[in-house]
Image (cartoon, rainbow, N blue to C red):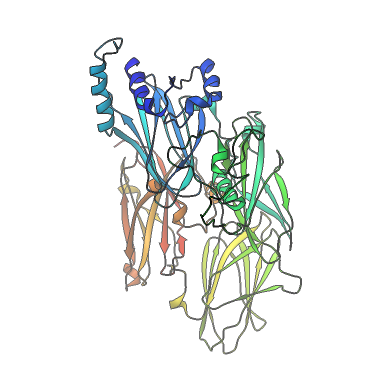
Amino acid sequence: MVLLHWCLLWLLFPLSSRTQKLPTRDEELFQMQIRDKAFFHDSSVIPDGAEISSYLFRDTPKRYFFVVEEDNTPLSVTVTPCDAPLEWKLSLQELPEDTSGEGSGDLEPLEQQKQQIINEEGTELFSYKGNDVEYFISSSSPSGLYQLDLLSTEKDTHFKVYATTTPESDQPYPELPYDPRVDVTSLGRTTITLAWKPSPTASLLKQPIQYCVVINKEHNFKSLCAVEAKLSADDAFMMAPKPGLDFSPFDFAHFGFPSDNSGKERSFQAKPFPKLGRHVYSRPKVDIQKICIGNKNIFTVSDLKPDTQYYFDVFVVNVNSNMSTAYVGTFARTKEEAKQKTVELKDGKVTDIFVKRKGAKFLRFAPVSSHQKVTFFIHSCLDAVQIQVRRDGKLLLSQNVEGIQQFQLRGKPKAKYLIRLKGNKKGASLLKILATTRPTKQSFPSLPEDTRIKAFDKLRTCSSATVAWLGTQERNKFCIYKKEVDDNYNEDQKRREQNQCLGPDIRKKSEKVLCKYFHSQNLQKAVTTETIKGLQPGKSYLLDVYVIGHGGHSVKYQSKVVKTRKFC
């Protein structure tokens, strides 16, 4: 272990002229190290049990080190991208054997060890590419020098890293409730009321928390870090730290974030002085709002524009650690002005519809040309809705829709169709609807009548499962994803987990099995099978198949849970 300390100290020596101590999890030293900014001054060491914030220049990799002092130690590393996707990997650096017993300090062996640390790539433990908050966790890790490499290929960006050898006792990130969704409980022309289940961190662990609500018109956010990066870009043109500039990962002022100190620290946000002769570009205003409301779990957003779609995110923040966790965000459209009560559907165009609990929404479809048939494609994202279709006042269809449904009705020249959508008693409903007289040119992929995934019980092994699903005569792209779940995983958990209209782009890269194209002119032969390999014995897996159409819209088949054999 003495050798491990010497090697890490040598790696950090060029970064600071003063003597540095390794960040240990000795609690007596830990609090001192966190307060001592000089220790982490432009440092490549990740402290044990504290979150650091830093900056990446595009296409310029950055490397951090983390030391585990004893074998069989739990290890958790969490990386939070802020405003751009990241590529990162965690490796265990192989160090030379300590032949000197107590470490005599001879320069010759240390020089050899230095060169070996630089040349050796180490053993890769985990890698990820994307903008999700992703983590590596191990209940028993060997002692050694762990190396974290990060890269941003899109743009200069911020990120956060948290590493700990005591994940069970630390719990810096607040926990989410069993149902992590944000619900829309009331909808008006200028107001929307949100509600969510309280975090167990407050109710069970008795830790102080607060909720922050974020409202914008563009998209949902995956982390509070991404929100803060967007807000700082809105307030002023954020100046990135230049290579070699002295800054601390704990000093947010250099990144455009507000400083905790009152006026003593420099802040580029407060006084953005442009250099003489340099043109300063101002960024366009970003319509985003962040409001922290304490520990209340219901909030009414006001001063909204009528007939406008908004995206809502809720983050629970641990007041002690200042770390946060994101609820599953939602979106909703405010009510139209009083005179506009019917939504006009355009032929072949997908429309997003929000129906409040027990509420109703009226849609109108008036084809501009004569037609023989009309096809309605409905994708209910959350809870079931009731649909009624009338043609020139005559009722043609009345049915409950849950998941994905497609209806084809006989047309009539110059006919007009009135669609009534009614929400259920459980909660608000989100759905996508498409009406067309040209079903071959629709934006959604064609679907078979049966969208179930069939699992072959006799073909199950300890490490694989074989499934099949139906296709159509249209050539489409199919992608299959797997996710390990608990044995008591049920249908209610599936519905609670996420918005069913979200596509495969929200899934983790590690969950992807494969993508392939498939079709058959003979519908009786339009079936494909796939064997998912690399599974663990006696484990349950949630399987999802996405079909992606030519217009880029994706539809998910009904999820299937399979369990591998425990003994083979």
Can I make out residue 550 in this image?
yes
Looking at the picture, how far across and down is residue 177, in whole percent? 60, 40
Looking at the picture, how far across and down is residue 186, in whole percent? 72, 56
Q: Quarter holding the C terminus?
A: top left
Question: On the image, which quarter does residue 209 sit in?
Answer: top right
108 or 482, nearer to the observer:
108
Question: Which residue in the rendered view is the most extreme toward the right?
Answer: 338
Q: Quarter holding the N terminus?
A: top left
Say whether residue 509 is left or right of residue 289.
Answer: left
Looking at the picture, how far across and down is residue 71, in whole percent? 36, 20
Say whether residue 1 is left or right of residue 46.
Answer: left
246 or 152, nearer to the observer:
246
Question: On the image, which quarter does residue 136 sit in?
Answer: top left
384 or 477, nearer to the observer:
477
Question: Which residue in the rendered view is the most extreme toward the front?
Answer: 276
Looking at the image, which residue is at 44% across and 51% down?
155
Looking at the picture, how far across and down is residue 519, in whole percent? 33, 68
Q: How many marks?
A: 0
Looking at the image, which residue is at 32% across and 70% down?
520
Can I make out residue 143 in this image?
no
Looking at the image, which residue is at 62% across and 45% down?
271
